[in-house]
Image (cartoon, rainbow, N blue to C red):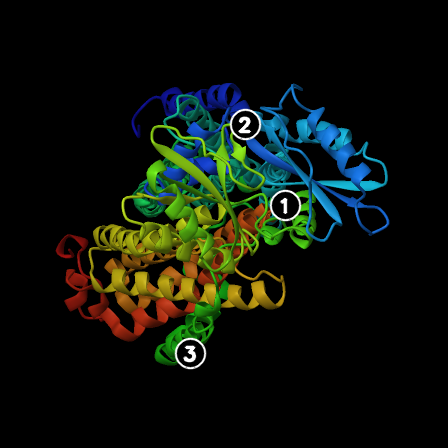
Amino acid sequence: MRNAPRWARWAVPLALVLVWLGIGGTLGPYAGKLGEVATNDQAAFLPRSAESTQVLQARKAFEASASVPAILVWTADDGGRVTAGQQRAATQAAAGLAGRPGIAGTPSPAALSADGEAVQAVVPLAPDLGERTPEVLDEVRRAAERVPGTSVQVAGPAATQADLSDAFAGIDGLLLGVALGAVLLILLLVYRSVLLPFVIIISAVFALGLACAVVYALAARDVVRVDGQVQGILSILVIGAATDYALLLAARFREELAVRGDRIAAVRAAVRRSAGAVTASAATVALGLLALLASDLTNNRALGPVGAIGILCAVLTTLTFLPAVLALLGRAAYWPATPKPADATAEGHRIWQRVAALVDRAPRRVWAGTALLLCVLAAFAPALSSKGVPLDEIFVNDAPSVSAQQTLARHFPAGSGNPAVIITDAGRAAAVRAAAEGTEGVAAVRPVTAAGGGRPAPGGPAEPLVVDGRVRLDATLDDAADSDAAKDTVRRLRENVHAVPGADALVGGYTAQQYDTQLTSARDRNLIVPVVLAVILLILAALLRSLIVPVLLVATVALNFLATLGVSALLFQHVLGFSGTDASVPLYGFVFLVALGVDYNIFLMSRVREESLVHGTRQGVLRGLTTTGGVITSAGVVLAATFAALMVIPLAFLVQIAFIVAFGVLLDTLVVRSLLVPALVLDIGPRAWWPSALASRFEEGPVPARNLG
């Protein structure tokens, strides 16, 4: 290219820009279409091998048609007892729903509570309503409101699904707008440039459009699964990663442009010197996400390949579209803060000169102090409960399904509407029922009968429905289905029914699913965490050609993760009022924080090694910290802001993930990467590069790069 005609030097950048404009125009709309192939059916995201999943499949044979129950609960307006006439009117209102669009079977008669102050009826909804669920529930509610002198609420799985659909409504436009707006504002304030922020935003949008198009095609063919959570995380992950990588490349191009003057040569040098760090950083995140494929939870496995696709698309735009645009714009990309020769030297970064001087004066005191601070914060990590989120904490705002479930629990056994489901051998059904009724925490056990249309018999002797030699028993629990007490009851119930000889009994249902998910998440953490750490360690060793530095980097980001969990435990319990987190939150937080935290250390240490080849380890650390300080801090702030955008979705899971990643990234950027890591490497000295030849060199002066391993 150096000796090529002038027109040829511009042909490649121009062609790349045109290609990406075509890709963006064609595939960009897919960023708003993922909802078409997304599912929020929680039954699709259960452990594959769990007992509750086996029951979920087996129970379908006992249902006249597949359905999702909506539970209508009526209470008297005057707060007193429900009259017999109101109970009859409630039964008629429920029965009148049969045959309407979206209703999958015959609603049950209205049953009176033991205190006489409420009645309930179960309305089966079609399982494939998807986004129509809120609309159908509104029709059900309007029909139920015709009972005079009462107020009606809708609880049960169908109502929860409707509230989830409302929470994710408009996720594409809202989340994308908030994230891109935050990134654009930060870039404009930090870089004081008119064009560069928009170039970086366009690069991120192109990456997201390409990623969404690929994921859409795969999800439409059932190769991957997408739900609202995966959909939201994909958008944030791509925007954050693409912006981070773009900032690193743009900062390097600015340096090279200040030295070389020729924009084409500067782009080539910037890409050559940034590509290793960018690809290594992307590899840590992508492979860390792919480690989720080892999970037994479907939604975890779904996030792995979807997230990895997003990261690859972010790298692709960073190393093709962005260099092409920078080559065409040159200095104009940074206007009015155009690059000057001083920008190419470490002396051009005064704030980070002071930080480097602080680290240089007392490295041992700096790393010991920061490590102690992180350890103190990490000491609170065990206080973070990850046993699952109660139903009344799933939504950040008040949700109709939550208040309805609370009303149901006040007047009926708290487990009403979400029974434990027992599938057992027909010949041992009586013994299994007796074992279940004798279990502490079980309020009642009823068989599913043919006469009841596939519903439990209301009481008294009834012949159970037998399907392939098996019967189904529904056990109503004393405690709320999402409570720890109910999970303990399920554990005892399984022990008791499993002990019945020849019954081959299985226990499932909502509570069992939550219990199995909790156990599976713990197993996943024990398996996936070491895999992610090993993958990152290998990538760092290959990039830095050292063993000691990679171990230090992995240890520091792991400590940062534990410190973040400690702060989260204090904030969630004492400020936000969360009693705990979803079982998957710590694993998601680990994968994102460790993989993304290593990113910034890769950006720093790859530059430190480059400088150390010429100036020695001490000067290499100081110059690397000074020259990368601004861009890495900007990247960290941008990534924290993009993940914080998840808080616009009123779900506890995403709010918790948003805080953990945003806070952890800032802590990593401002403390771990700025103080702890440089101070550790300075204190250890050249030996930190062992077994590279850098470990044995003296600091008096540079040695030829060809002599360094």
Q: Is residue 212 visible?
A: yes
Q: Which residue is mark 2?
A: 453
- Binning the other alpha carbons within 10 Å of mark 1 as few (below 14), some (14 to 19) or many (20 upward) gives some
| Mark 3 vs mark 1: in front | 1
Which amino acid is tagged 2?
A: Gly
Q: Which residue is mark 3?
A: 369
| Mark 2 vs mark 3: in front | 2
Q: Position of residue 672 (x, y in %)?
A: 41, 65
Q: Is residue 258 visible?
A: no
Identified at 75% across, 32% down, the residue is 144
| Mark 1 vs mark 2: in front | 2
Q: CA distance from mark 3 to mark 1?
A: 36 Å
Which amino acid is tagged 3?
A: Gly
Q: Position of residue 198 (x, y in %)?
A: 57, 36
* Mark before the other along the chain sequence, 2 or 3: 3
103 vs 538, nearest the viewer:
103
Which amino acid is tagged 1?
A: Val
Image height of 211 relative to 368, above or below: above
Q: Which residue is mark 1?
A: 648
Within the image, what quadrant is residue 378 found in? bottom left
